[in-house]
Amino acid sequence: MSSDASSLERLRAIARRRWQLAVALTTTMVATYFGFLALVAWAPSTLATRLAPGLAHLVVCALGQRRV
């Protein structure tokens, strides 16, 4: 029975760690999403700033979203 109890405790620890990671990643993504929306709403000219000839911030953001 002792090994069952230790296995259950290890499983609970793994589940707790997984939940903490999920919450941290979700919080990060929500903050990034709403931050981008706020940037578009209140400072759209920032996205039009040229980083190099023909390359603006918005182009860099779009490339970051490209799926392979």
Image (cartoon, rainbow, N blue to C red):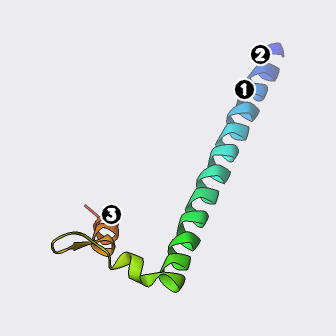
Between disc 3 and disc 1, the foreground one is 3
Above or below: residue 8 compared with residue 2: below
**Quarter of the figure that contains the C terminus:** bottom left
User: Residue 52 location in percent, x, y?
Assistant: 19, 67
- Name the amino acid, label 3: Gly
**30 and 16: which one is in front?**
30
**Quarter of the figure that contains the N terminus:** top right
User: Residue 7 location in percent, x, y?
Assistant: 73, 23
Q: What number of labels is visible? A: 3
- Name the amino acid, label 1: Arg
User: Residue 54 location in percent, x, y?
Assistant: 16, 75
- 53 lies left or right of 21: left
**9 and 59: which one is in front?**
59
Tell me the SS state at disc 2: helix
Give the mark nearest the N terminus, 3 or 1: 1
Q: Mark 1 points at which residue?
A: 10
Evaluate if marks 1 and 2 touch, with contact meaning CB atoms under 8 Å apart: no
Q: Distance between the residues labelled 3 and 2?
A: 47 Å
Q: Which residue is drawn at 56% across and 61% down?
A: 29
**54 and 66: which one is in front?**
54
Tell me the SS state at disc 3: helix
